[in-house]
């Protein structure tokens, strides 16, 4: 709870007061699932950090050792195309942006190019544990 309720001490105090009141009324131990139910509205009211396409570009370029300019460029070399496709895939998964918007942010590309990238990664992902690990690592880096 303390990790989720970090806005103020009052927020945490309110959650503890709710749990204590529940315990006094029910006279039974409070399990983790019961505690989550009691303070759900406090915890779910906090929005997770929004991931932006700019964040994805930064993390992907750093991870693959290519410049952001290269990812946004018209270059079609494999060393640039693969990070670009992964960036587009992550952008669709982690943001609410449309395919045309993602295409614009990745160097004014057409929405069909973005769709191709997403489908390509989706097709490879189930059979490639190394790619799955890499995608998960990038997601972790983005969520921090």
Image: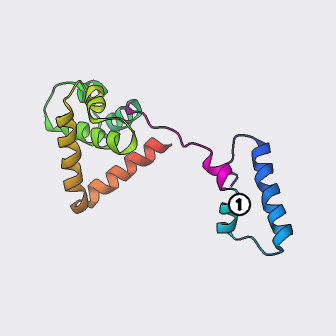
The quarter holding residue 102 reads top left
The boundaries of the magenta stretch are: 40-53
Q: Is residue 52 magenta?
A: yes
At x 20%, y 48%, the residue is 119
Q: Tell me if residue 25 can be seen.
A: yes
At x 45%, y 37%, the residue is 51
SS for callout 1:
helix
Which residue lies most toward the right here?
A: 24
Q: Quadrant of the N terminus?
A: bottom right
Q: Nearer the viewer, residue 43 or 134?
A: 43
Q: Residue under label 1, please give it.
A: 38
Q: Is residue 98 left or right of residue 140?
A: left
At x 15%, y 38%, the residue is 78
Q: Position of residue 67 (x, y in %)?
A: 29, 28
**Residue 61 sits above or below residue 18 on the image:** above
Q: Nearer the viewer, residue 121 or 35?
A: 35
Q: Position of residue 120 (x, y in %)?
A: 18, 48
């Amino acid at each position: 709870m303390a990790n989720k309720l970090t806005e103020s001490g009052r927020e945490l105090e309110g959650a503890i007061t709710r749990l204590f009141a529940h315990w006094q009324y029910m006279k039974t131990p409070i399990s983790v699932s019961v505690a989550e139910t009691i303070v759900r509205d406090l915890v779910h009211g906090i929005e997770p950090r929004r991931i932006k396409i700019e964040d994805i570009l930064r993390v992907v370029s750093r991870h693959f050792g290519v410049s952001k300019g290269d990812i946004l460029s018209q270059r079609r070399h494999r060393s640039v195309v693969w990070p670009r496709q992964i960036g587009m895939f992550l952008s669709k998964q982690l943001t609410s942006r449309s395919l045309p918007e993602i295409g614009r942010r990745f160097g004014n590309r057409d929405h069909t190019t973005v769709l191709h990238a997403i489908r390509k990664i989706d097709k490879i992902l189930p059979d490639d544990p190394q790619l799955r690990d890499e995608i998960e690592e990038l997601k972790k880096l983005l969520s921090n």
